[in-house]
Amino acid sequence: MTEVVVTLDLDGVTEKAGLMDRAARALALPGWFGRNWDALADSLGDHTVWPEEAVERGLLIVVRNWRPYAEACPEEWRIAQEVFAEAADHTPALSVALALGGSS
């Protein structure tokens, strides 16, 4: 059984609020999602807010079009990468991949 793939598309995102909004939308996070780094880390590691089918199959988050954000906000992007990496390290059913290609 293959894992559930969710695309986190950062096209046009140039600040943290945009990244949090896109993450909330892509992952269908609940309304109480705090839109900060701790809340994102908690949500990534919390199976109860994942898509239902991902609980059994695992979750792969593919981050696309991240380079402009990384260039505009290098410190925030460093934190985002740490949050993604730590969540994946602590949650065996979670993987996060950075897409290296373009938007096609």
Image: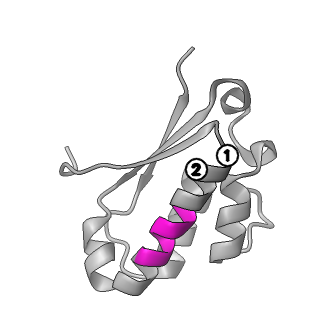
Can see residue 66?
Answer: yes
**Residue depicted at x 69% and y 27%:** 53
Direction from residue 76 to residue 58 in the image, left or right: right
Quadrant of the rendering where the N terminus is positioned: top right
Question: Foreground: 78 or 55?
Answer: 78
The disc placed on residue 91 is 1
**Residue depicted at x 50% and y 76%:** 79
**Residue depicted at x 76% and y 43%:** 47
Mark 1, Cα crowd under 10 Å, few <14 / some 14-19 / many 20+, is some
The disc placed on residue 88 is 2
What residue range appears in magenta?
78-84
Vertically, is 78 above or below 27?
Answer: below
Direction from residue 16 to residue 37 in the image, left or right: right
Mark 2, Cα crowd under 10 Å, few <14 / some 14-19 / many 20+, is many
**Local SS, label 1:** loop
Residue 30: percent from left, percent from top: 76, 57
Query: Is there a contact, CB below 8 Å, between mark 2 and mark 1?
Result: yes
Direction from residue 91 to residue 61 in the image, left or right: left
Question: Foreground: 12 or 84?
Answer: 84
Residue 39: percent from left, percent from top: 71, 69
The disc placed on residue 3 is none
Vertically, is 10 above or below 16?
Answer: above
Vertically, is 100 above or below 68?
Answer: above
Which amino acid does the dot numbered 1 rest on?
Thr
Find the residue positioned furthest to the front. Answer: 89
Find the residue positioned furthest to the top. Answer: 1
The reply to whether the magenta stretch includes residue 7 is no
Which amino acid does the dot numbered 2 rest on?
Ala
